[in-house]
Image (cartoon, rainbow, N blue to C red):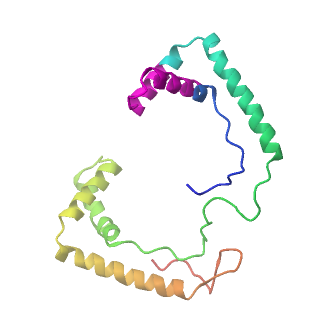
Amino acid sequence: MGKGDPNKPKGKMSSYAYFVQTCREEHKKKHPDTAVNFSEFSKKCSERWRTMSAKEKGKFEELAKNDKSRYEREMKNYIPPKGEKGGKKKKDPNAPKRPPSAFFLFCSEHRPKIKGDNPGISIGDVAKKLGEMWAKQSAKDKVPFEQKAAKLKEKYNKVKGGLVPRAGEGGWCGGAAPSPF
């Protein structure tokens, strides 16, 4: 988990998070040697929180309020490191579209038949059937799809190879036409 700035203020906790933290501490005191089943523990905490009165929740809401003001105070003084912008790289709309895999070519060929044979079938069930069909295919039956996928990939690499990423903008140069795939 080496990501992130170690100097960034710790996030603020909700009243429920403080409640769960208290529950965990109570559980550790009562059962120091017992491993905690997380889903069971979460359900019990959730149920307990739901049945608590507003007065009982007040203590945790006060802790959360104090933590929120601490967080806001620390964030005012926090200066993020320069040059580090989070997030994914933006996808260039002019870049060629990646070619489909052999499996996707198989799916596009067989999907209409499955839909025709099973009107009203859900998208998930169609995908499941296609996956099962692909798994049952022999290596020999997969060859035409794999060859077509290889040709498309080669074509893609040629088109992409002729393009040069633009400095700074992350765009593509070289007359990128719409995808040939």
The quadrant in which residue 13 appears is top right
Part of the protein shown in magenta? 19-47
Tell whether position 39 is magenta: yes
Query: 149 or 110: which is nearer to us?
Result: 149
Looking at the image, residue 68 lies above or below residue 113: above
Please provide percent x and percent y for residue 6: 68, 52
Residue depicted at 36% across the width and 72% down the height: 101
Q: Is residue 173 above or below residue 82?
A: below
Q: Residue pushed farthest right?
A: 77
> Depth check: 5 or 159 in front?
5
Residue that appears at 69% across and 61% down: 85
x, y (%) of residue 116? 26, 56
In the picture, the quarter occupied by the N terminus is bottom right
The reply, left or right, for residue 78 in relation to residue 56 is right
Q: Is 57 or 144 nearer to us in this picture?
A: 57
Quadrant for residue 55, please give it: top right
Rendered location of residue 89, percent (x, y): 61, 66
> Tag count in the figure?
0
Q: Report the residue at 56% width, 89% height from top.
A: 162
Question: What is the chief secondary structure element of the magenta stretch?
Answer: helix
> How far from the left and from the top, in percent, is residue 100?
39, 72
The question of residue 82 being in magenta is answered with no
